[in-house]
Amino acid sequence: MAGEIAERLSRVRERMEAAARRAGRDPSAVRLLAVSKLVPAERVVEAAEAGQTLFGENRFQGSAEKLARVRELRGADAPPLQWHFIGHLQSNKVRKVLQTFDCVQSLDSLDLIRRVEHVAADLGITARGLLQVNCSGAPTQYGFPPERLEEAAEAAARCPHLRIEGLMAIGPNTTDEKVIRAAFRDVRRRAEELAQRGFDGVTMETLSLGMSGDFEPAIEEGSTLVRIGTAIFGPRER
């Protein structure tokens, strides 16, 4: 139905604002990334028309075509959208992802950091990225163990064509809010510690924490960017 996505966006933004105010935070300090995986270009355009400007994809396959279709539908005069890559990034896809996306939120290994630096240097660009943290300890989850974040930041600091802007984490797969909050709180604490170290080319301005099921406690624990898909676009058609 027309306006469905605009209504969903409005409700999400209201919940974000309320969570920020509960934590005594300025609501404008928290950004919303709309996760558009498996969402047709036409629905992305509807979200953009409702004021959404930041989107994320977790698969490269098909994303370049979707982004091109979104640009075509919006017209040449439409203001540009920002696109983040938020899924696991394979080494052989780095070049295409850097040519397509504005930021990679899922830098999850030293090898990937080095590969991004090499490709960015070859392209003559400065890549933007976040270090992904495995804050749950789950063996199936990608990301640096929290105790290896300093090592990752040191490696990134040696990469002149890579700018690290913060951390990204996926919350623990549990309904226990205390466990979720503790994990997010630990990520925030480690971001603060890294910021104090002052690594070259590494800032902690972005904490990408929280998805449709846990973005409110994430905001209350310090998230500055939440990644919302289902609450905006509804269940995906696979």
Image: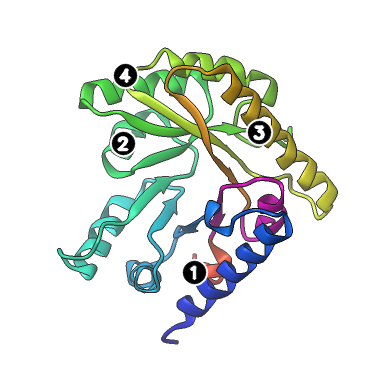
Dot 4 falls on a residue whose secondary structure is: helix
What residue did someone put label 3 on? 134
Mark 4, residues whose alpha carbon is within 10 Å: few (<14), some, or many (≥20)?
some
Q: Are marks 3 and 1 in contact (CB under 8 Å)?
A: no
173, above or below 162, in the image? below
In which quadrant of the rendered view does residue 160 lie? top left
Q: Give the range drawn in magenta.
A: 211-228
Q: Which of marks 4 and 3 is nearer the N terminus?
A: 4
In the image, what residue type sits under mark 3?
Answer: Asn
Which amino acid type is shown beneath numbered disc 4? Answer: His
For label 4, the residue is 118
Does residue 91 sit above or below 211 in this rendering?
above
Residue located beneath label 1 in the image: 237
The N terminus is located in which quarter?
A: bottom left
Nearer to us of marks 3 and 1 is 3
Q: First in sequence, mark 3 or 2: give its number.
A: 2
Picture coordinates of residue 101 (x, y %)?
Answer: 33, 44
Q: What residue type is labelled 2?
A: Leu
Colour mapping used in the image: rainbow
In this rendering, the count of numbered labels is 4
Residue 28: give x, y in percent of width and height: 53, 57
- Secondary structure beneath label 1: loop
